[in-house]
Amino acid sequence: MSDEIARDKTTQIPIRRALVSVWDKTGLEDFAKGLVDAGVTIVSTGSTAKKIAAAGLPVTPVEDVTGFPECFEGRVKTLHPRIHGGILADRRKPEHVAQMKELEIEPIDLVVCNLYPFEETVASGADFDDCVEQIDIGGPSMVRAAAKNHPSVAVVTSPELYSHVLEAVQDGGFDLRERRILAAAAFAHTAEYDAAVATWFDDQLTRFAMESLGVDPSELAESEDSPLPEWVELSGDRVMSLRYGENPHQAAALYVDMDDLVARADEGEDCFCPECAPHPDLDDLEACDAAGSDPEAVPAPGIANAIQLHGKEMSYNNYTDGDAAIRAAYDHQEPCVVIIKHANPCGIAVADDVAEAHRKAHACDPVSAFGGVIAVNRPVTVELAEQIAPIFTEVVLAPAYEPGAVKALAAKKNVRVLRVTPPDRGALEVRQISGGYLAQQRDDVAEKGDTREGWTKVCGPDVDEATLADLEFAWQTIRATKSNAILLAKDGATVGIGMGQVNRVDSCKLAVERANTLGGRETGDAAADNQADVAGGARAEDIAVAAPPERSRGAVAASDAFFPFADGPQILIDAGVKAIVQPGGSIRDQETIDVCEKAGVTMFTTGVRHFFH
């Protein structure tokens, strides 16, 4: 709503009597004074009434209206016909108006109410009874009653709207359109609240059930039998309308769980809701560069909460690719750079510094890296920024940027530069399907078989530390690759990726083909030589140095799932792969093992699968 609204005078209802009952008392005194100055009678409850009275303002306690005292430690205050009758009576109906007079019920024109801090209480670690005590009953009842009867009553649930309320009071009241908007917001408010209560209660029932079976609830997250909740809360506030979705004919928007951000702030973290987040002015390059390294400007977890430091507005595809990229970068402990295109990696590498990691990642497939998304799990250095700048890149994401790095990236006007904190590990992943939702625990590459200590060597000679390190890198990298996936790696970098194929043989062929026909080096020294060409519009494939021959020879391979037949490993063996890591578990495992044994190729099994669709 705007401060200047052309209201429909025929549907306006003057605000003469308001019921004010709020937990969040932000701005309450000024708001109440504005109502009183406008001639509005205030009816109020408990601590709200006391705060208004303490400000020297006239207020009618709710018990003076009901003729009944607040009771049961304030559990019963407003649940009375003189309150709910004043809210719910439909004044369009003469019989309702007549009955109000008969029962001596005065109409209530405005309900101002926000609810007990249930989620904040849960987040504080309070015990079960204390959490239950913060389940609001009277508040949601009043809010829903007023929202239902919006033809006669206006309802407000946020202190942020107080100025709009006072403006409407002075202008003769809200019109029907405004009351409908307020009613929709009120129903969303109570729906989110009820969903939070239901989700928490379901979790408590699960814990009680486990305790009755003698299972420690604190071990649920580690238990293979840990059930997912029976109720999943999906709520969010639209924080950005995007130009379009995956395609121009699809509408799209970004939604964020604002309640989660507020709860984090209540737990002592900085609040990064749109009103509080320190998003710099994108036209002020100095401020953006400073925000990249500001230790106080760390965003809340996840790409949806990222702070943009440069470039055009993010698109739907930027968000999906960026999310895939930042997750892949944080699959690794070492400094890592990931290049993503259409949610698949063009190259991933680890190194002692991020500039070297980028050179290695880019060399995997510089053709596809053109127009890609780059994510880094360490601060972006000026060297890395200058290395990226000549290459057409859609988005760069990192936890921070060294002073000067944002300026270097800003050499390209449109590249989107984001400061992002990785998503929380162990989160629930929800995907919509027609008619419902699927939920699963996120694949965080944190299983026993995701490190070499959990592997079994099933054939071949012992391998050296460098080969083991490459195998471990390949295995932890393949999680980010669409199935069916085969990945070749060498010296801490991908050299060939076969992804998204409907059979594993084709994935093996594609990985080998891409290893031996793509690649080259267009970063580092070559980047400096070619910078003028790129700035002039040359494409990456036009300036890439020829790939070294047969990069597959001497590489290691990872497979995201078991080999159903020996033909896949045979393709890798023929290409010169020296070691393979895969989940194992096929009824034909022995055939695969025999082929590798005969060729002198070492094979490890992990017991863990990493399908990704």
Image: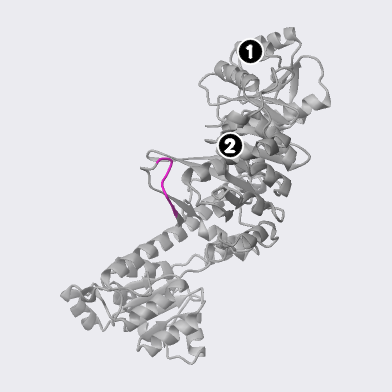
The question of residue 577 being in magenta is answered with: no
Region rendered in magenta: 241-247
- Can residue 422 be seen here? The reply is no
The single residue placed furthest to the bottom in the displayed view is 56
Q: Residue placed farthest to the top in the image? A: 598
Give me the residue at 52% from left, 42% from top.
Answer: 320
Q: Secondary structure at mark 2?
A: strand
- Nearest to the observer: residue 106 or residue 391: 391
- Counting from the top left corner in percent of width and height, residue 89 is at 25, 73
Q: Which residue is mark 1?
A: 571
Q: Amino acid at mark 2?
A: Ile
Residue lying at the far left in this picture: please name it.
94
Reading the image, the residue beneath label 2 is 340
- Percent from the top left, x then y, of residue 71? 46, 78
Q: Judge whether 299 appears above or below 230 on screen.
A: below
Residues at marks 1 and 2, CA–CA distance in whole angstroms = 26 Å
Is 118 above or below relative to 164?
above
Amino acid type, callout 1: Ile
Identify the main secondary structure in magenta. Answer: loop
Residue 170 horizontal/vertical position (percent): 34, 83
- Residue 511 image point, x, y percent: 61, 21
